[in-house]
Image (spheres, grey):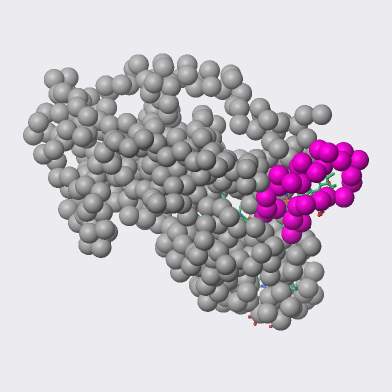
Amino acid sequence: MKSICDTAGWRRQPLFLTALLLVAVTAAGAGLLFAWRAAPQNWSRQPLRNALTAQVVRPADWAELTLAGGPGGNDWVLLPPQPQQHSPFRSAVTGAQRGFLAPQDCVDCHADYCETFQHTSHARTSMLPSATSILGSLQPGRNLLTTARPELQFRMHSLDGKIVQTVELQYPPLRTVFTDSFPIDLVFGSGNHGQSYLWWNGDQLCQAHVSYLTESDAWVNSPGPYYDGTVDFSRPVPVRCMECHVTWIAADPQEMNRFDRSTLIPGVTCVRCHGPAHEHVAFHRQHPAETEGKRIVNPAGLSIERQNEICAQCHSAGEEHASLFSYRPGEPLQQWLQLDLAASAESNADPHSANQLARLMQSRCFQQSGGFACTLCHDPHQNQLDGAASFAQHCRSCHQQNSCPEVQRGETGAIAGDHCVACHMPARRDAQVAMQTRQGNIEALLRDHQIGIWPETAAAERSKLADKLRQALQPQDNSQNSRNAQEGSAP
Ligand code: HEC
Ligand code: HEC
Ligand code: HEC
Ligand code: HEC
Ligand code: HEC
Ligand code: HEC
Ligand code: HEC
């Protein structure tokens, strides 16, 4: 019996979607290729690399630029790294040889797990590019990122069978439009919050300038030091990004961003939490009658500490001692990663995980109950994103609903019981994950895992609950009308 995550289905997109995209893009592309702000007909088009008279900062100056707080005058262009001269890095080892198998290798015997798992953010956190995996719009009119510099914009479109980000810089002194296109070779992010895009410069993986932000359904400058009005396709993607966002890839130990891309296993999948699985698979193929799982880690059988360390590989700040691609669930994580358990939700030394383990461990719930696993609230095999209210049941497994004065108090008490986490685990804007947009900075909204009493959050949530309650108490047809009215006014 095959599930939709069988060997072929796991990656392949339905053909008709690809065809649809091709038709749409060809039609649109033909009409729009030269339509940008009616770029004057007699201007010449040249590769961006020729824009020598523009103020150019080369990657070597990157540190300086960052230290200086970025380009003040917005008059900077960062060129991509030079084309590769060396032969591409090839690894003698593949993930499979180390036991890092893809979900396709599990589906014969665990079709049910594979089926639900493929819809999770973990499975979708890195994907090969396609019309469905890239969430930003490629539709003409919506496929642009304009910037603070009127002469600079980015266009996302198809070119020679690839989806690319094209930089378009109108340079008046030379009456020239400089353009350069960078392929989207790897999509990072399920789109819960947004997506970033990576491209291969030879065997070196670099980040593209433009990201996608779900909250505003728009293309944006990538988070971090991607300043509005600049161009940067040179930033290397270090191994650490890959350790958190892919299942496995062979990395050149001498360099920060050289990889053997033929070894990539996209998504954070089964073996990152269950450990090397080749012996398990070999055993069960040889012993089809065996009903007890052998030679594989079931986290449920580990101590709370060891269980949570599996998640902490990627969900807490710390100092790395050895590559996490060699970590084996069940072993003490500190040999690989020394966790910083004093970290705050916002002080994420590593790019942007909100330090969920450290924060959870700082709460009285964790300390005074003897501790519990992330899986108390999260099922790693299911997409749980629609169920924020369902989390209250986990609070109730330890707390009497009435133990919260808020639940007993006043008009909102009646529904507060389903919203424990809204008040006690605040969703916070994280300044470490800020994107510069022309409407101002937008910061990602992440859930603080220190369960506690947060008076300001509680006050805000209390008034939201009061609104909700008021709406719920309105007669049925009124609320229907107002919902329709709202939908009608949406753009
Ligand atoms: C040839 C069949 C087969 C393949 C392929 C297979 N498994 Fe299993 N696995 C089993 C059987 C049988 C069990 C025991 C029954 C059960 O729990 O489903 C099991 C159990 C498990 C368990 C629970 C172990 C325990 O101690 O309770 C885990 C975790 C697991 N498999 C993970 C994987 C992963 C990950 C893959 C793919 C890399 C995989 N399996 C591939 C047959 C297989
Ligand atoms: C190898 C790295 C890695 C490991 C191990 C890992 N995660 Fe994640 N996790 C991620 C990344 C990356 C994301 C962001 C996915 C996205 O949206 O693109 C994520 C997202 C999540 C989310 C939010 C999205 C959702 O589906 O609700 C939850 C919850 C989560 N992880 C829980 C866990 C738990 C619990 C464990 C341990 C059992 C764990 N993770 C282990 C990397 C990891
Ligand atoms: C220490 C692990 C870790 C590293 C390193 C890391 N990420 Fe993440 N990333 C996460 C987690 C975890 C999330 C989910 C948000 C959260 O829980 O804080 C995430 C979220 C994201 C998202 C948004 C996904 C969504 O939810 O829609 C993008 C895009 C992303 N990361 C890109 C990158 C890039 C690019 C790099 C390298 C420059 C990188 N990440 C490095 C762990 C990591
Ligand atoms: C983010 C981490 C993570 C990922 C990814 C993951 N699992 Fe699990 N898995 C767990 C944890 C944690 C448990 C223990 C759950 C519990 O506490 O009951 C588990 C339990 C299991 C079990 C045993 C269930 C039982 O009856 O005890 C199987 C089988 C399994 N996983 C298979 C898979 C397969 C197959 C995949 C990939 C398609 C996968 N898992 C992906 C974390 C993960
Ligand atoms: C495994 C059991 C357990 C779970 C699950 C749990 N708690 Fe607790 N919690 C405790 C214990 C024990 C304490 C400390 C003693 C007390 O105050 O009752 C505590 C304390 C608290 C406090 C007081 C915190 C402070 O800093 O004074 C709040 C608020 C709270 N819990 C809310 C929650 C919410 C909301 C959830 C669900 C998201 C939750 N708890 C889940 C066991 C738990
Ligand atoms: C509207 C916000 C809000 C909601 C919803 C809410 N709480 Fe509270 N909770 C508070 C505030 C504020 C306090 C601080 C106590 C006070 O009001 O003096 C508190 C206190 C607590 C305490 C500590 C009581 C003590 O004696 O120290 C616990 C435990 C608790 N809540 C659990 C829960 C649980 C479980 C739920 C869901 C069933 C929940 N809360 C829902 C706002 C909320
Ligand atoms: C007491 C319940 C509880 C426990 C235990 C718990 N979480 Fe969560 N977690 C939540 C809730 C509630 C959310 C918000 C879900 C939503 O908004 O849909 C969340 C969200 C997340 C997210 C999404 C990040 C974001 O804000 O977008 C990640 C990642 C995550 N948890 C990881 C973990 C990890 C890792 C652990 C263990 C260290 C853990 N969680 C333990 C309740 C819990």
Residue drawn at x 66%, y 27% as measured from the top left: 8
Residue 30 counted in the magenta span: no
Residue 291 counted in the magenta span: yes
Q: Position of residue 236 (x, y in %)?
A: 36, 48
Q: Position of residue 303 (x, y in %)?
A: 74, 69
Relative horizontal placement of residue 80, taking residue 177 as reference (left or right): right
> Which corner quadrant of the image does residue 472 belong to?
bottom right
Above-or-below relation of 454 to 185: below
Above-or-below relation of 42 to 169: above
| Quadrant in the picture for the N terminus | top right
In this rendered view, identify the residue nearer to me: 247 or 365: 247
Residue drawn at x 19%, y 56% as measured from the top left: 72
**Tag count in the figure?**
0
Residue drawn at x 53%, y 18% as measured from the top left: 19
Q: Which residues lie in the magenta part?
A: 273-299
Residue 395 visible within the image: no
**Quadrant of the image where one finds ligand 5:** bottom right
Residue that extends furthest to the front in the rendered view of this protein: 92
> Which corner quadrant of the image does residue 199 belong to?
top left
Q: Position of residue 134 (x, y in %)?
A: 49, 35
Relative horizontal placement of residue 175, taking residue 362 as reference (left or right): left
Residue drawn at x 29%, y 48% as measured from the top left: 228
